[in-house]
Image: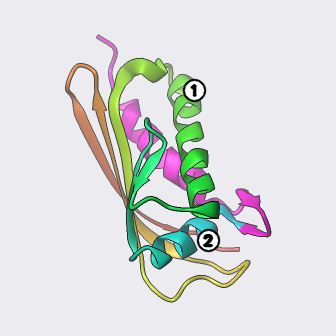
Amino acid sequence: MTSLKALKSVAHNVIHQFASTLNYWSGDYGINHLARAVLDAGGTVTIDLLARSSVPALTDNGNFSVGQLANLLPTLLVKEGFSPELLSSASARFRFRSPAPSIGGSTACDCLVSFTTTEGRSYEVRLTELNAP
């Protein structure tokens, strides 16, 4: 059986790439769009990266952010030599604190990324990310 240690790298990179200042669209950084949507919904969101959904459900740019995060996962899995079908579950729980970031500003978030493989192995990575323009 292939080592699955690289799944921790995938978990880290899916959030790190999304929070990067290179992820800029619709007039602001992707993480800022997500932060504003999550703060409007109470401050915490859990995103199912396989189902491309969130609890609570986000709208507009928040929902677009969910799709962006979900799109990153299979690409990063393949890059590390894994099949996208390896995972039976994949989620990212974000917690943002007020105030909402200004356009072009920075925001910090705490994130827990959880993966479970089809064989039942689980991986969790806790991250604190800051996009610093």
Q: Quadrant of the N terminus?
A: top left
For image coordinates 55% across by 84% down, the residue present is 100
Identify the mark nearer the N-term, 1 or 2. 2
Residue 57, given in percent of the width and then of the height, sits at 44, 58
Mark 2 nearby-residue class (10 Å; few <14, some 14–19, many ≥20): many
Image vertical order of residue 34 relative to residue 22, above or below: below
Q: Residue furthest bottom?
A: 99
Q: Which residue appears at 37% of the width and 46% of the height?
A: 91
20 in the magenta segment = yes
Residue 76 on image: x %, y %: 55, 33
The magenta region covers: 1-28
**Mark sitting on residue 56:** none
What is the spatial separation of the Cα atoms under label 1 and label 2, in whole angstroms? 27 Å
Which residue is most to the top? Answer: 1
Instruction: Indicate which disc residue 32 carries.
Output: 2
Q: Is residue 15 depicted above or below 82 in this figure?
A: below
Q: Are marks 1 and 2 in contact (CB under 8 Å)?
A: no
Q: Does residue 97 lie above or below 59 as drawn?
A: below
At x 61%, y 47%, the residue is 68
Residue 82 showing in the rendered view: no
Q: Is residue 76 above or below residue 92?
A: above
Give the amino acid at mark 1.
Lys
Q: Residues within 10 Å of mark 1 (few under 14, many from 20)?
A: few
Q: Nearer the viewer, residue 58 or 8?
A: 58
Residue placed at 43% from the left, 35% from the top? 50
Which residue is the site of mark 1?
A: 79
- Asked which secondary structure carries label 2, the reply is helix
- The residue type indicated by label 2 comes to Asn
